[in-house]
Image (cartoon, helix red, strand yellow):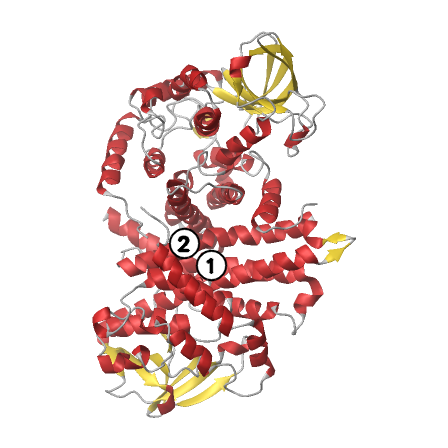
C-alpha cells in the first residue's frame, strides 16, 4: 500500500500544468465566449503545444511509439486540465479514445494521428446509464446521426452505433463527416451533431468486443470527467478564497465572517475527500482491478457533488460580481455544471453502485 | 501508487482475523460500557486483547505493542470492526493520550503509565472542557498553583467521557494566573482517586452515564506528572486534538463496516415496507451517499497514512477529516433509521432477558455526538477556512 504519486509522475503533472497555464488563461476563454465564429475556441497552437508533450500518446505502448504510461500519470494531468477549464479534448483523447483504440488492437495507421499527426478525439454516440452504456446514435438514411458530441470540432471521434449484429465502434474523421455545431451554456465545450457513414475502414470493433469496449469507454469518460471536476473545484475555491480575503464590507474582509468561511470550508472538505477516490479509480483502471466500475462510480459521484457544491458556494461568496458575464467565475462554473452531468451524474452513479453491490452480494451468497 | 497490501500485510490480517473471530464476544454479551458493570465487562475484554498483544499493535513491544506500522494498525482496525469488536473502553487513553505521551512524556512517565493503559488496568478520561470553556477552549479557568513537590489543582472540568468510572484523567490547567488565552497552560496527568477529586456522572441522551463533571478542590499532583513543560500545555493539547480529529481516534473501518451493513439493510428491506431498494429511489440514493462517503474516508486515510509513513505530518487537514467522519457517521445511521421506519425507535432483545436500543439506534445517538465533541464542526470549519484556505481571522 503506497497511495501517492511518484516523483516522476508529479514532475510530469507539473510540466504539463505549466504549459496549460501559459496556453489557457481566463482571457482565452472569454475570447471564445466573445466570438460568433462557429468553431471559435479550438486553437491549433495551443493544441500543438500540448500534443508536442506527447500526452495523446501517453497510453500507447513504447514499442508502438508512445510513452507507455498509464492512467496513474494521466489522471493528475487531467486534473490540471480541469483547473484551467481547458477547451481542448486532452483528457478525452489521451484517457478515453486512444486507450480504447489500443485495447481494440488498432493498427499503427489508426493510431498515427495521435502519435505524430496532431490528432484530437472524443467519444460520442453513447451515454451512461446505471445498468450499462446506451447507444444514442440514430439512423439517418444510409448515414448515422450522432448528437451532443463534446469538442465536436476535434479531428476525430470514436462513435458508437447499433447494427442488427450488435454495437459497433468507429473512428471517424470529422473532415469526412457533416458537422453541425449546437450552442450550449458552456460555449468552449463546443457541442455538435455529426452525420457520418460507417465503413469497414472506420470500424474499430464489433459484436461482443465492441460491447466490452463501449463499457470501458464510458467508464473512462466518467473517470476523466471526474478528474477535470477536481481541478475545476480547486480553481473555483482558490479563486473565491482570494476574492473574499480581499473584498471588504463593514470595514473587514468578507472572508473573516463565519458564514462565508463555512460555505468555503464545506466545499473544500468535499474536494478533499473526492480526490483520493478519483486517484484510486485511476489505479483500478490502470491495473485492471475487478472493482473498476465500482471505483469509477464512487469517484464520479463524489467529484460531481463536490463540483456542484464548489460552484454553488463560489457564486454565493462572490456575490453579484460573480453573477456577471465578464467575471472569470462562470468560465469554470459552467464547465463544472456540464461535466458533473456528463457520463452519469452523481445520482446515476450511485444507482449503479446499488446494482453492483447487489450483484456482488448475490454472487457471494450463491 | 499501489493500493494492494503486501503478503506480509495479508498474513498480519489473517492472524488478526483468526484471533478476533475466536475471541470477540457475540453482540450483546458485554453490558453497556457506560454502566458500572459494563465498564468492567469491557475492561476484561481489553485485558484479553492485551494478553494476546492486540490492544495496541503499533506501540513499542515494551508496553504491550507489536511495533508495527500505520498500515498494519489500519488493517487491525478493519478486522476489529469486521469481527464486530466492542467499543474500546480505553479509547481516550490509547488513541488520544498515547500519541501525545509518545511525543512528550518522560521515560519514567511512559514506564509508569503505558502498559497499564494498554491492558485496561487504568482507564483514562479527558479533562479539557469547562462550563465556560467549550468551543472557546483557551478560556480555561481551572488553575494549578505551585506547592512543594508538585501542584494544587482547583476548578471544574466537564463532558469528561468515561469520567464516571475512569481511574485517571489528562487535563489542562492554568499555571500562570497572569497569562491569558493559550499561554500559561499546563498539561497534567491526574489520579481520579486523589483527595479533592469529586465526580458527578452525567447521563447522556441514552440515559447512561457516558460522561461526567469533575470538580478539583486542591488536588495534589506531583511534578513528575506534568506532561511536557510548564506553560506549554496548549501545544501539547493540540497534539492530542490532532489525534482526536485525525485518523487515530476514528479509523475508517468503523464507517465502512457500518456502511456495508447499511447496504445489506437496504437490499433486505422488502418493497412492501415502502422504502424499497429500487436503485432510483430516494432512500437508495441516501444510502449510497453514506456508503460512498465511508469509502471516500477509507481511501483518504490510506493516502494520509502513506504521507505519515513517508515522514509528513498532518496539520489542519485533521479538521477536515473530523468534519467528514463525524458527518458520515450521522448519515449512515440516519439512513438506516429511515429504512427501519416507524420500527426504528423500538428497543430490541438484549440477549440477557431484557431490552436495549437497537444497534442502529444506539449508533445514531452515538453518531450525533460526533459533530460536537473533539471541537464542534463549526470550529473545525473555521480551522479549514483559515488554515487550509488562508481566509482572514475574525
Count numbered badges in the picture: 2
Q: Which label was assigned to residue B293?
A: none
Q: Is residue B292 left or right of residue B65?
A: right
Q: Secondary structure at mark 1?
A: helix
What is the chain identity of the residue bearing mark 2?
A
Q: Secondary structure at mark 2?
A: helix
Task: Name the N-terminal-most of marks 2 and 1.
Answer: 2
Query: Which residue has dot 2 on it?
Result: A277
Q: Residue furthest right?
A: A250
B343 relative to B351, above or below: below
Q: Residue at x 56, y 80 (%)?
A: A32
Q: Quadrant of residue A140?
A: bottom left
Asked if the residue at tag 1 contacts the one at tag 2, i.e. Cβ–Cβ closer than 8 Å, the answer is yes
Q: State the separation of the CA atoms marked 2 and 1.
A: 9 Å
Q: Nearer the viewer, residue B241 or A26?
A: A26
Q: Residue at x 60, y 45 (%)?
A: B381
Residue count near mark 2 (Cα–Cα under 10 Å), binned few <14, some 14–19, many ≥20: many
**Is residue B280 in sight in this rendering?**
no
Q: Are marks 2 and 1 on the same chain?
A: yes
Q: Quadrant of residue A317?
A: bottom right
What is the chain identity of the residue bearing mark 1?
A
- The location of residue B214, given as percent across then percent down, is 60, 18
Q: Residue at x 47, y 81 (%)?
A: A42
Q: Is residue B284 left or right of residue B387?
A: left
Q: Which label was assigned to residue A303?
A: 1
- The location of residue A142, given as percent across then percent down, is 32, 92
- The location of residue B9, given as percent across then percent down, is 26, 39
**Is residue B6 in sight in this rendering?**
yes
Amino acid at each position: 500500500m503506497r497511495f501517492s504519486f511518484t516523483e516522476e509522475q508529479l514532475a510530469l503533472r507539473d510540466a504539463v500544468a505549466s504549459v496549460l497555464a501559459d496556453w489557457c488563461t481566463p482571457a482565452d476563454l472569454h475570447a471564445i465566449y466573445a466570438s460568433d465564429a462557429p468553431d471559435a475556441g479550438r486553437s491549433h497552437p495551443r493544441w500543438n503545444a500540448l500534443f508536442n508533450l506527447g500526452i495523446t500518446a501517453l497510453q500507447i505502448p513504447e514499442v508502438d511509439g508512445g510513452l507507455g504510461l498509464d492512467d496513474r500519470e494521466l489522471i493528475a494531468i487531467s486534473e490540471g486540465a480541469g483547473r484551467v477549464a481547458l477547451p481542448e479534448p486532452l483528457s478525452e483523447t489521451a484517457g478515453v479514445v486512444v486507450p480504447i483504440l489500443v485495447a481494440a488492437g488498432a493498427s499503427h495507421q489508426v493510431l498515427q494521428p495521435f502519435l505524430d499527426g496532431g490528432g484530437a478525439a472524443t467519444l460520442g454516440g453513447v451515454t451512461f446509464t446505471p445498468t450499462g452504456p446506451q447507444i444514442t446514435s440514430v439512423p439517418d438514411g444510409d448515414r448515422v446521426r450522432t448528437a451532443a458530441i463534446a469538442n465536436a470540432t476535434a479531428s476525430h471521434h470514436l462513435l458508437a452505433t447499433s447494427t442488427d449484429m450488435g454495437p459497433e465502434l468507429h473512428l471517424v474523421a470529422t473532415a469526412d463527416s457533416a458537422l453541425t455545431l449546437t450552442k450550449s451554456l458552456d460555449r468552449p465545450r463546443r457541442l455538435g451533431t455529426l452525420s457520418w457513414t460507417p465503413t469497414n475502414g472506420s470500424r474499430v470493433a464489433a459484436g461482443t468486443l465492441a460491447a466490452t469496449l463501449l463499457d470501458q469507454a464510458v467508464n473512462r469518460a466518467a473517470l476523466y470527467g471526474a478528474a477535470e471536476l477536481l481541478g475545476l473545484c480547486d480553481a473555483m475555491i482558490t479563486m473565491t478564497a482570494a476574492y473574499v480575503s480581499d473584498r471588504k464590507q463593514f470595514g473587514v474582509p468578507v472572508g473573516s465572517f463565519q458564514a462565508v468561511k463555512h460555505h468555503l470550508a464545506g466545499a473544500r472538505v468535499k474536494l478533499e475527500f473526492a480526490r483520493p477516490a478519483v486517484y484510486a479509480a485511476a489505479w483500478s483502471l490502470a491495473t485492471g482491478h475487478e472493482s473498476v466500475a465500482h471505483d469509477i462510480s464512487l469517484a464520479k459521484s463524489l467529484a460531481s457533488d463536490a463540483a456542484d457544491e464548489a460552484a454553488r458556494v463560489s457564486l454565493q461568496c462572490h456575490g453579484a460580481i460573480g453573477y456577471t458575464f465578464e467575471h472569470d467565475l462562470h468560465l469554470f462554473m459552467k464547465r463544472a455544471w456540464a461535466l458533473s452531468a456528463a457520463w452519469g451524474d452523481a445520482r446515476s452513479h450511485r444507482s449503479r453502485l446499488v446494482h453492483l453491490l447487489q450483484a456482488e452480494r448475490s454472487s457471494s451468497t450463491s | 501508487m499501489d493500493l494492494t497490501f503486501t503478503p506480509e500485510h495479508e498474513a498480519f490480517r489473517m492472524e488478526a482475523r483468526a484471533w478476533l473471530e475466536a475471541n470477540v464476544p457475540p453482540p450483546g454479551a458485554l453490558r453497556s460500557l457506560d454502566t458500572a458493570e459494563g465498564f468492567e465487562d469491557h475492561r476484561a475484554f481489553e485485558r484479553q486483547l492485551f494478553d494476546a498483544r492486540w490492544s495496541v499493535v503499533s506501540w513499542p513491544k515494551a508496553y504491550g505493542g507489536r511495533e508495527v506500522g500505520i498500515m498494519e494498525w489500519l488493517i487491525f482496525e478493519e478486522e476489529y470492526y469486521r469481527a464486530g469488536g466492542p467499543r474500546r473502553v480505553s479509547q481516550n487513553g490509547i488513541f488520544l493520550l498515547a500519541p501525545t505521551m509518545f511525543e512528550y512524556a518522560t521515560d519514567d512517565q511512559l514506564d509508569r503509565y503505558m502498559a497499564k493503559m494498554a491492558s485496561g488496568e487504568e482507564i483514562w478520561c479527558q479533562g479539557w472542557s469547562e462550563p465556560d470553556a467549550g468551543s472557546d477552549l483557551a478560556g480555561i479557568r481551572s488553575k494549578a498553583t505551585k506547592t512543594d513537590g508538585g501542584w494544587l489543582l482547583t476548578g471544574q472540568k466537564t463532558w469528561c467521557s468515561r469520567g464516571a468510572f475512569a481511574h485517571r484523567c489528562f487535563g489542562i490547567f492554568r499555571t500562570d494566573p497572569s497569562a491569558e488565552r493559550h499561554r500559561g497552560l499546563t498539561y497534567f496527568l491526574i489520579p481520579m482517586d486523589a483527595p479533592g477529586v469529586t465526580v458527578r456522572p452525567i447521563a447522556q441522551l441514552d440515559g447512561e452515564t457516558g460522561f461526567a463533571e469533575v470538580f478539583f478542590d486542591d488536588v495534589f499532583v506531583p511534578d513528575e506528572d506534568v506532561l511536557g513543560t510548564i506553560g506549554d500545555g496548549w501545544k501539547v493539547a493540540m497534539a492530542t486534538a490532532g489525534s482526536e480529529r485525525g485518523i487515530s481516534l476514528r479509523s475508517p473501518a468503523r464507517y465502512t463496516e457500518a456502511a456495508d451493513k447499511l447496504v445489506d439493510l437496504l437490499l433486505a428491506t422488502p418493497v412492501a415496507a415502502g422504502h424499497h431498494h429500487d436503485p432510483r429511489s430516494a432512500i437508495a440514493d441516501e444510502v449510497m451517499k453514506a456508503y460512498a462517503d465511508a469509502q471516500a474516508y477509507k481511501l483518504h486515510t490510506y493516502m494520509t497514512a502513506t504521507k505519515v509513513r513517508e515522514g509528513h505530518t498532518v496539520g489542519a487537514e485533521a479538521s477536515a477529516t473530523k468534519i467528514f467522519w463525524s458527518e458520515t457517521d450521522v448519515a449512515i445511521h440516519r439512513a438506516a433509521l429511515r429504512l427501519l421506519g416507524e420500527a426504528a425507535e423500538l428497543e430490541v432483545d438484549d440477549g440477557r432477558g431484557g431490552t436495549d436500543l437497537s444497534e442502529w439506534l444506539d449508533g445514531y445517538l452515538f453518531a450525533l455526538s460526533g459533530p460536537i465533541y473533539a471541537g464542534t464542526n463549526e470550529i473545525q470549519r473555521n480551522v479549514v477556512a483559515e488554515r487550509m484556505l488562508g481566509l482572514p481571522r475574525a
